[in-house]
Amino acid sequence: LCGSEKLGLLIDLGFHPLADTFLKPEQLNEAEPTYPLRVLQCESCGYTMSQYVVSPEKRYQENEYSYDSSNSKVAIKHFEEMASDVIERAGVTGDDLVVDIGSNVGTLLEAFHKKSDCLVLGVEPAPNMAARAKQNGVPTIQDFFNGTVASKILGTGKVKAVTITNAWNHVEGLTDFMEQVKRILAPDGMFVTEVPYLSLLVQKIAFDTIYLEHVSYFSIKPLIPFFKKFGFSIVDLQENDYMGGSIRISAMQGTKESVQVQAYVKREEEEHLYNSATYSVFMDRVRRFKADLVGRLYRIKKDGGHIVGIGAATKGNTLLNYCKIDNTLLDFVTDSSAFKIGKYTPGSHIPIKSDESIGPEITHALILPWNIGKFLQEKLGQLSVDFIVPEMGSRV
Ligand SMILES: [Zn+2]
């Protein structure tokens, strides 16, 4: 973000395949590329990033992308709340246009349209997701957000808000991205992004939210001078539990910075977020977590138990691959998404089946998306299995 080349290595999780790319059966007979999963931090501004960036074409277009936000009740409810919040704070009315980048199947934009009657436009690079959005009646440009796409958007309406949720951290080339956002946004328009927050990642030892699709691990301090370069200031910050711990950052042109911003910087300094020693402790905890979890799973198998994984979530793949949990430990992983059932988890090659596939022989269920562990336990409450939730409680 600041152009410095002084970068320190914070976290090294070894080699991983793309976490969002579930494999078709025939792909099990092919070589599977893996890449180093390492996190660096800029010693000048504190910006935290992946060392190795897999090309966006490989991440979103070469393989069928499988995350579908309309598949999750938790996601739909979250996006409805977010649409209401942005409509109110940005003053979106029926005459305005809201652009969502990385719009997936259009869940957030549907909520915007429903609540304010505004015009909406999505930008989504994954062909299968863009096609689904169009079928759902959400106008969508199937491409990466770039200068050409920005030119197409210009003149289609007054862009009162540009949103990007859980995708800004996937973007390579943030300077160019922000220049294009500034080009399309009305002078009184608002840029709103929601991303996993580095502070919460460290607090919760959420190492499984680190994966190759993530280019940036955002915190507030380095973003202040970054936004200033474009004449923007952060006008609002809100934390929430979504995706295991996210922050909603709103920025507008002008110098009227929220009073929250300096409080966040103070908190980040107090948490030693820009000190490499913090991440040595983090990795010690991660290694201990791995030993505890794998030991527990082996004991269950030794006693004749059968274990399934619940939820073929992206973050589950970092956990499975880092802990070397494969199809000898988990019989299968369940998921409700038609994009995933019948496929295999990347790296660990565990078959993905429907929830209904859990038979009486299954004794234990490892909940992979621990951030919605409670919801999944309630949903599967009728099963007579012991649930294992690998969340921070057991990470301490
Ligand atoms: Zn920097």
Image (cartoon, rainbow, N blue to C red):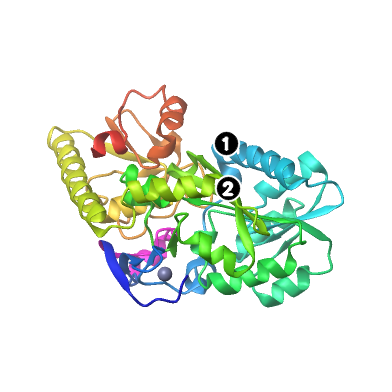
The local secondary structure at tag 1 comes to helix
Q: Which residues are magenta?
A: 12-29
The residue at which mark 1 appears reads as 73
Q: Using the image, determine if residue 169 lies above or below residue 44.
A: above
Q: Is residue 324 visible?
A: no
> At which x and y percent is residue 33?
34, 71
The residue singled out by tag 2 in the image is: 69
Question: In the structure shown, which secondary structural element does the residue marked by tag 2 occupy?
Answer: helix
Task: Verify whether residue 18 appears in magenta.
Answer: yes
The quarter of the displayed image where residue 365 is located: top left
Question: Where is ligand 1, by quadrant?
Answer: bottom left
| Mark 2 and mark 1: Cα distance apart in space | 9 Å
Query: Mark 2 belongs to which amino acid?
Result: Ser
Looking at the image, which residue is at 30% across and 38% down?
A: 392
On the rendered image, what quadrant is the C terminus found in? Answer: top left
Residue pictured at 61% horizontal, 57% vertical: 233
Can residue 107 be found in the magenta stretch? no
